[in-house]
Image (spheres, grey):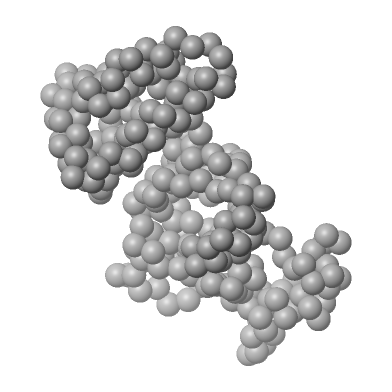
Protein backbone atom coordinates (compact mmCIF):
# COMPACT_ATOMS: atom_id res chain seq x y z
CA UNK A 1 0.00 0.00 0.00
CA UNK A 2 1.27 3.45 -0.91
CA UNK A 3 0.54 6.72 0.85
CA UNK A 4 -0.69 9.63 -1.26
CA UNK A 5 -0.16 13.34 -0.91
CA UNK A 6 -3.50 14.73 -2.10
CA UNK A 7 -4.53 18.24 -3.03
CA UNK A 8 -7.12 20.19 -1.05
CA UNK A 9 -9.26 22.74 -2.89
CA UNK A 10 -10.37 25.84 -1.04
CA UNK A 11 -13.71 26.88 -2.53
CA UNK A 12 -15.70 29.24 -0.32
CA UNK A 13 -18.63 26.82 -0.09
CA UNK A 14 -16.40 24.54 1.98
CA UNK A 15 -16.12 24.32 5.74
CA UNK A 16 -13.55 26.29 7.69
CA UNK A 17 -10.59 24.92 9.55
CA UNK A 18 -10.76 21.82 11.73
CA UNK A 19 -14.56 21.45 11.35
CA UNK A 20 -13.90 20.27 7.79
CA UNK A 21 -13.44 16.56 7.14
CA UNK A 22 -11.20 17.54 4.23
CA UNK A 23 -8.86 19.45 6.55
CA UNK A 24 -8.78 16.54 9.00
CA UNK A 25 -7.91 14.01 6.30
CA UNK A 26 -5.24 16.25 4.79
CA UNK A 27 -2.99 15.52 7.80
CA UNK A 28 -1.24 18.87 7.47
CA UNK A 29 -1.24 22.20 9.26
CA UNK A 30 -4.85 23.43 9.44
CA UNK A 31 -5.52 27.11 8.90
CA UNK A 32 -8.63 27.89 10.93
CA UNK A 33 -9.65 30.81 8.70
CA UNK A 34 -9.24 28.79 5.48
CA UNK A 35 -12.05 27.04 3.65
CA UNK A 36 -11.44 23.33 2.99
CA UNK A 37 -13.95 22.17 0.36
CA UNK A 38 -12.58 19.19 -1.58
CA UNK A 39 -9.79 16.62 -1.32
CA UNK A 40 -8.87 15.06 -4.66
CA UNK A 41 -7.35 11.59 -5.08
CA UNK A 42 -6.44 10.82 -8.67
CA UNK A 43 -4.53 12.03 -11.70
CA UNK A 44 -6.69 14.97 -12.78
CA UNK A 45 -4.50 17.80 -14.07
CA UNK A 46 -6.10 20.37 -11.74
CA UNK A 47 -5.21 18.43 -8.61
CA UNK A 48 -2.96 15.44 -9.24
CA UNK A 49 -2.04 13.23 -6.30
CA UNK A 50 1.55 12.25 -5.57
CA UNK A 51 2.87 8.96 -4.25
CA UNK A 52 5.02 9.29 -1.12
CA UNK A 53 8.34 7.44 -1.38
CA UNK A 54 10.24 8.50 1.73
CA UNK A 55 10.97 12.21 1.22
CA UNK A 56 10.34 11.93 -2.50
CA UNK A 57 7.03 12.65 -4.24
CA UNK A 58 6.13 10.89 -7.50
CA UNK A 59 3.16 12.09 -9.56
CA UNK A 60 0.51 9.37 -9.46
CA UNK A 61 0.20 9.38 -13.26
CA UNK A 62 3.95 8.70 -13.55
CA UNK A 63 3.70 5.92 -10.96
CA UNK A 64 0.99 4.26 -13.05
CA UNK A 65 3.15 4.46 -16.17
CA UNK A 66 5.99 2.72 -14.34
CA UNK A 67 3.70 0.21 -12.61
CA UNK A 68 0.81 -0.54 -15.01
CA UNK A 69 0.11 -3.78 -13.15
CA UNK A 70 -1.60 -1.80 -10.34
CA UNK A 71 -4.27 -0.61 -12.78
CA UNK A 72 -7.34 -2.44 -13.96
CA UNK A 73 -7.11 -4.02 -17.41
CA UNK A 74 -9.41 -1.37 -18.89
CA UNK A 75 -7.14 1.40 -17.59
CA UNK A 76 -3.90 0.19 -19.14
CA UNK A 77 -2.48 0.94 -22.59
CA UNK A 78 -2.17 4.64 -21.84
CA UNK A 79 -5.82 5.20 -20.90
CA UNK A 80 -5.05 5.81 -17.24
CA UNK A 81 -7.22 6.07 -14.15
CA UNK A 82 -10.90 6.30 -15.11
CA UNK A 83 -12.29 7.96 -11.98
CA UNK A 84 -11.58 10.79 -9.58
CA UNK A 85 -12.20 10.20 -5.87
CA UNK A 86 -13.20 13.32 -3.95
CA UNK A 87 -14.00 14.04 -0.33
CA UNK A 88 -16.33 17.03 0.08
CA UNK A 89 -16.99 19.22 3.11
CA UNK A 90 -20.01 21.36 2.29
CA UNK A 91 -20.67 24.40 4.46
CA UNK A 92 -22.80 26.28 1.93
CA UNK A 93 -24.74 24.68 -0.90
CA UNK A 94 -23.14 24.22 -4.30
CA UNK A 95 -24.67 25.60 -7.48
CA UNK A 96 -27.33 23.55 -9.25
CA UNK A 97 -25.63 21.40 -11.88
CA UNK A 98 -25.90 18.36 -14.11
CA UNK A 99 -23.34 16.38 -16.08
CA UNK A 100 -23.49 15.34 -19.74
CA UNK A 101 -23.58 11.88 -21.24
CA UNK A 102 -20.38 10.51 -22.75
CA UNK A 103 -21.51 11.55 -26.24
CA UNK A 104 -22.52 15.03 -25.09
CA UNK A 105 -19.22 15.46 -23.25
CA UNK A 106 -17.26 14.69 -26.40
CA UNK A 107 -19.30 17.16 -28.43
CA UNK A 108 -19.03 19.90 -25.80
CA UNK A 109 -15.30 19.38 -25.41
CA UNK A 110 -14.76 19.59 -29.16
CA UNK A 111 -16.77 22.82 -29.37
CA UNK A 112 -15.54 24.59 -26.20
CA UNK A 113 -12.39 23.32 -24.53
CA UNK A 114 -12.24 26.31 -22.17
CA UNK A 115 -15.45 25.46 -20.34
CA UNK A 116 -15.25 21.71 -21.06
CA UNK A 117 -11.55 20.86 -20.61
CA UNK A 118 -11.96 17.12 -21.04
CA UNK A 119 -14.19 14.80 -23.04
CA UNK A 120 -15.21 12.52 -20.17
CA UNK A 121 -18.71 12.13 -18.81
CA UNK A 122 -19.00 12.47 -15.05
CA UNK A 123 -21.60 10.27 -13.37
CA UNK A 124 -21.26 10.54 -9.59
CA UNK A 125 -21.59 7.99 -6.80
CA UNK A 126 -22.06 9.91 -3.55
CA UNK A 127 -21.31 8.07 -0.30
CA UNK A 128 -21.97 9.87 2.99
CA UNK A 129 -19.18 9.96 5.58
CA UNK A 130 -21.31 12.19 7.81
CA UNK A 131 -24.93 13.30 7.59
CA UNK A 132 -25.27 14.69 4.08
CA UNK A 133 -28.06 16.66 2.39
CA UNK A 134 -28.68 16.74 -1.37
CA UNK A 135 -31.20 18.01 -3.87
CA UNK A 136 -31.29 15.52 -6.75
CA UNK A 137 -33.60 14.31 -9.49
CA UNK A 138 -37.06 15.63 -10.30
CA UNK A 139 -39.98 14.95 -7.98
CA UNK A 140 -43.14 13.29 -9.26
CA UNK A 141 -45.10 15.61 -11.58
CA UNK A 142 -48.12 15.90 -9.25
CA UNK A 143 -45.86 17.04 -6.40
CA UNK A 144 -44.12 19.60 -8.58
CA UNK A 145 -47.46 20.95 -9.77
CA UNK A 146 -48.68 21.22 -6.16
CA UNK A 147 -45.50 23.06 -5.17
CA UNK A 148 -45.85 25.55 -8.01
CA UNK A 149 -49.54 26.19 -7.39
CA UNK A 150 -48.82 26.98 -3.73
CA UNK A 151 -47.09 30.21 -4.77
CA UNK A 152 -49.19 32.91 -6.39
CA UNK A 153 -46.12 34.63 -7.85
CA UNK A 154 -45.22 31.49 -9.81
CA UNK A 155 -48.78 30.91 -11.00
CA UNK A 156 -48.76 34.46 -12.38
CA UNK A 157 -45.40 33.94 -14.04
CA UNK A 158 -46.07 30.52 -15.60
CA UNK A 159 -49.72 31.05 -16.41
CA UNK A 160 -52.76 28.90 -15.62
CA UNK A 161 -52.86 27.45 -19.12
CA UNK A 162 -49.33 26.02 -18.91
CA UNK A 163 -49.92 24.63 -15.42
CA UNK A 164 -53.21 23.01 -16.41
CA UNK A 165 -51.61 21.47 -19.48
CA UNK A 166 -48.77 20.07 -17.37
CA UNK A 167 -51.23 18.56 -14.91
CA UNK A 168 -53.69 17.19 -17.45
CA UNK A 169 -51.49 15.32 -19.91
CA UNK A 170 -50.85 11.63 -19.28
CA UNK A 171 -48.38 11.15 -22.12
CA UNK A 172 -44.88 10.77 -20.64
CA UNK A 173 -43.20 12.63 -23.50
CA UNK A 174 -45.65 15.52 -23.32
CA UNK A 175 -45.29 15.62 -19.53
CA UNK A 176 -41.51 15.92 -19.78
CA UNK A 177 -41.84 18.57 -22.45
CA UNK A 178 -44.24 20.62 -20.33
CA UNK A 179 -41.95 20.33 -17.29
CA UNK A 180 -38.97 21.40 -19.39
CA UNK A 181 -40.86 24.47 -20.60
CA UNK A 182 -41.90 25.48 -17.07
CA UNK A 183 -38.42 24.90 -15.65
CA UNK A 184 -36.83 26.88 -18.49
CA UNK A 185 -39.34 29.71 -18.14
CA UNK A 186 -38.46 30.19 -14.47
CA UNK A 187 -34.71 29.80 -14.85
CA UNK A 188 -34.46 32.22 -17.79
CA UNK A 189 -36.53 35.14 -16.53
CA UNK A 190 -34.75 38.48 -17.08
CA UNK A 191 -32.22 39.25 -14.31
CA UNK A 192 -33.95 42.52 -13.48
CA UNK A 193 -37.16 40.61 -12.66
CA UNK A 194 -35.64 37.97 -10.36
CA UNK A 195 -35.53 40.20 -7.30
CA UNK A 196 -39.21 41.14 -7.58
CA UNK A 197 -40.30 37.52 -8.03
CA UNK A 198 -38.24 36.20 -5.12
CA UNK A 199 -39.22 39.05 -2.78
CA UNK A 200 -42.92 38.29 -3.30
CA UNK A 201 -42.46 34.55 -2.99
CA UNK A 202 -40.32 34.78 0.16
CA UNK A 203 -42.75 37.27 1.72
CA UNK A 204 -45.62 34.84 1.16
CA UNK A 205 -43.63 32.02 2.78
CA UNK A 206 -42.67 34.21 5.74
CA UNK A 207 -46.33 35.03 6.43
CA UNK A 208 -47.46 31.40 6.45
CA UNK A 209 -48.63 30.02 9.79
CA UNK A 210 -47.29 26.59 8.85
CA UNK A 211 -44.40 26.14 6.46
CA UNK A 212 -43.66 22.98 4.50
CA UNK A 213 -40.24 21.37 4.35
CA UNK A 214 -39.91 22.84 0.86
CA UNK A 215 -40.68 26.32 2.22
CA UNK A 216 -37.99 25.91 4.89
CA UNK A 217 -35.44 24.81 2.32
CA UNK A 218 -36.16 27.84 0.13
CA UNK A 219 -35.90 30.18 3.11
CA UNK A 220 -32.60 28.59 4.16
CA UNK A 221 -31.12 28.90 0.68
CA UNK A 222 -32.23 32.53 0.45
CA UNK A 223 -30.01 33.42 3.40
CA UNK A 224 -26.95 32.61 1.29
CA UNK A 225 -28.29 33.48 -2.17
CA UNK A 226 -31.02 36.12 -1.73
CA UNK A 227 -31.23 37.05 -5.42
CA UNK A 228 -30.47 33.71 -7.06
CA UNK A 229 -33.29 31.98 -8.93
CA UNK A 230 -31.66 28.67 -7.95
CA UNK A 231 -33.20 28.90 -4.47
CA UNK A 232 -36.43 27.64 -6.11
CA UNK A 233 -34.85 24.27 -6.91
CA UNK A 234 -36.59 22.56 -3.94
CA UNK A 235 -39.89 23.08 -5.75
CA UNK A 236 -38.71 20.68 -8.44
CA UNK A 237 -36.05 18.38 -6.98
CA UNK A 238 -36.07 15.63 -4.36
CA UNK A 239 -34.62 16.50 -0.97
CA UNK A 240 -32.46 13.59 0.19
CA UNK A 241 -30.80 13.16 3.60
CA UNK A 242 -28.08 10.52 3.69
CA UNK A 243 -26.77 8.99 6.89
CA UNK A 244 -23.15 7.83 7.16
CA UNK A 245 -22.64 4.83 4.89
CA UNK A 246 -25.67 5.54 2.71
CA UNK A 247 -25.21 6.43 -0.94
CA UNK A 248 -26.92 7.71 -4.05
CA UNK A 249 -26.00 7.57 -7.74
CA UNK A 250 -26.27 10.68 -9.91
CA UNK A 251 -26.42 9.77 -13.58
CA UNK A 252 -26.01 11.95 -16.68
CA UNK A 253 -28.38 14.91 -17.05
CA UNK A 254 -29.70 14.51 -13.51
CA UNK A 255 -29.89 17.94 -11.82
CA UNK A 256 -28.39 18.04 -8.35
CA UNK A 257 -26.96 20.27 -5.67
CA UNK A 258 -25.07 19.34 -2.51
CA UNK A 259 -26.52 21.32 0.40
CA UNK A 260 -24.60 20.36 3.52
CA UNK A 261 -22.29 17.71 5.00
CA UNK A 262 -18.72 16.70 5.65
CA UNK A 263 -18.36 18.41 9.00
Quadrant in which residue 63 is drawn: bottom right
Quadrant in which residue 117 is drawn: bottom right
Residue 62 left/right relative to 22: right
Q: Which of 107 and 122 is in front in this view?
A: 107
Q: Where is residue 224 in the image (x, y as percent from the top left)?
A: 25, 49
Residue 236 left/right relative to 127: left
Tell me the quarter of the image containing the N terminus: bottom right
Q: Position of residue 126 (x, y in %)?
A: 57, 46
Q: Residue at x 55, y 48 (%)?
A: 99
Q: Nearer the viewer, residue 22 or 160?
A: 160
| Vertical comparison of 184 with 67: above or below | above
Q: Position of residue 161 (x, y in %)?
A: 33, 15
Q: Would residue 70 be seen by someone viewing this image from the given angle? A: no
| Vertical comparison of 29 with 213: above or below | below
Q: Residue at x 45, y 30 (%)?
A: 180
Q: Which residue is drawn at 53% across and 63% down?
A: 112
Quadrant in which residue 9 is drawn: bottom left
Q: Which of 18 and 181 is in front in this view?
A: 181
Q: Would residue 78 be seen by someone viewing this image from the given angle? A: yes
Q: Where is residue 5 in the image (x, y as percent from the top left)?
A: 59, 76
Q: Residue at x 53, y 58 (%)?
A: 87
Amino acid sequence: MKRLDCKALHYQWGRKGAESTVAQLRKDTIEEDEFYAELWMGTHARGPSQVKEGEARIPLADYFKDHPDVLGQHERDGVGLQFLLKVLSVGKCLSLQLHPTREQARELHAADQTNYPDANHKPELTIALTNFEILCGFQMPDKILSNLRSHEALVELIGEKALSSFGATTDEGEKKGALKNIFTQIWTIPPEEIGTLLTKLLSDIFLKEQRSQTDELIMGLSEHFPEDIGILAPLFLNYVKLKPGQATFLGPNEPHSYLSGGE
